[in-house]
Amino acid sequence: MNKIAVAAITKHGTELARRIHKGSPQVDVFYMSKFEKGDEKEKGFTLFEGSVRKQLPAWFEEYDGIVMIISLGAVVRMISPLLKDKKIDPAVVVIDDKGEFVISVLSGHLGGANSLTRQLASQLHAEPVITTASDVQGTIPVDIFGQAFGWTIEDFTHVTPASAAVVNEEPLLIIQQAGEKNWQPSSKPLPTHMKVVSSINESENEKANAALVITHRELSEEEQAKLPDIHVIYRPKVIHVGIGCNRGTESAEIEEVITSTFQKLQLSKSSIKKVVTIDLKKDEEGLLHVCEKNNWPFDYYSPEKLNSAPIQNPSEVVYKYTGAYGVSEPAAVLSSGNETLLLEKEKSGNVTISVAVQEEFE
């Protein structure tokens, strides 16, 4: 959570807001002008006149989290016209005027309100109030499952019924084909109504009301048919793409090669962890544009480092021009830590591509 606003409308609330800022200087503080102390400009605090309701539309657009030291009922009435979708609404947290309770109100999981609530409660020595069922029960929070590892959800359609299956202790399958395995949210053993399998074929004979599928692969229609109607697909960041290209190659050509390669291999581009190349291409505009457009981390290696990686297809021609016996293959090997490539060097037009899958994390 990058930007947090803390707002108060009472004398005691103002003191609490200033106290929060003292412990968390990165927050932006807002309170009414009549409680001015004279150091607001120095501290970067903002004073306002009139109803706090008028400030909320701008705060909803600008901030990831909004902490309001105002009564819960008033906050609910004020924010209700501003709500759009839990995937984009900011986290909203309410603190009572005495600072005894910190209450997670809106966007508890996806927005981070529950986490912010715990953080503020610890700082203020207050009682955190969190009503999200999965948090209370200490079980899997479907809407942010794997978020700490960078996993993303393919489609939110079944998140709510899958969450209901989790908290109501209905039979649930967790099908994990890739990604970190230490996702269990507590030290408790996995509940008996949940079962972990490593393939969709294994799930075929299991009776389950819902499934959480952790995979870097695009599922075929046949595989989809084997899943319960209620299922959520998570994309772990495990795929490393090695790229070599001629100088001046257009971004559209590079992206098309990546897209067509992933379609052929039945891989999800949402699982790309990193795009890697040789340091001679660190300023290649087309490659940089593709990575920026898709929010793919970009990295590069020196020829000496690339030559330290074992590869199947060394090239004297590539060595003559780059000082490395290969670019896409060794880059993918080094980045992924996996010497067995899913796709060895494949050339298409001005682009050469290799693909490696990061080995599973414990």
Image: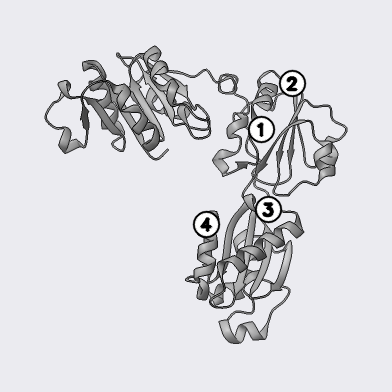
Cα distance between the residues tagged 2 and 1: 19 Å
What amino acid does circle 2 point to?
Answer: Glu
Q: Where is residue 61 drawn, in percent x and y?
A: 39, 36
Classify residue 317 by image quadrant: bottom right
Cα distance between the residues tagged 1 and 3: 29 Å
Image side of residue 222 versus residue 344, left or right: right
Q: Mark 4 or mark 1, which has the lower sequence index?
A: 1
Image side of residue 44 versus residue 127, left or right: left
Q: What residue is shown at x 60% (from left), y 32% (from top)?
A: 143
Label of residue 359 in the image: 3
Q: Mark 3 or mark 4, which has the lower sequence index?
A: 4
Secondary structure under tag 1 reads: loop
Circles 3 and 4: CB atoms closer than 8 Å: no
Q: Mark 1 or mark 3, which has the lower sequence index?
A: 1
Secondary structure under tag 4 reads: helix
Q: Where is residue 256 drawn, in percent x and y?
A: 65, 64
Q: Mark 3 or mark 2, which has the lower sequence index?
A: 2
Q: How crowded is the residue under tag 3: few (<14 C-alpha within 10 Å), some, or many (20+)?
A: some
Residue at numbered disc 1? 157
The correct choice, above or below, for 187 with respect to 306 in the image is above
> Which image quarter holds the N terminus?
top left
Cα distance between the residues tagged 2 and 4: 40 Å
Label of residue 130 in the image: none
Q: What residue is shown at x 78% (from left), y 30% (from top)?
A: 229
What amino acid does circle 4 point to?
Answer: Lys
Image side of residue 313 versus residue 99, left or right: right
Residue at numbered disc 4? 293
What amino acid does circle 3 point to?
Answer: Glu
Residue at numbered disc 2? 170
Classify residue 209 by image quadrant: top right
Closer to the camera in the image, 339 or 342 = 342
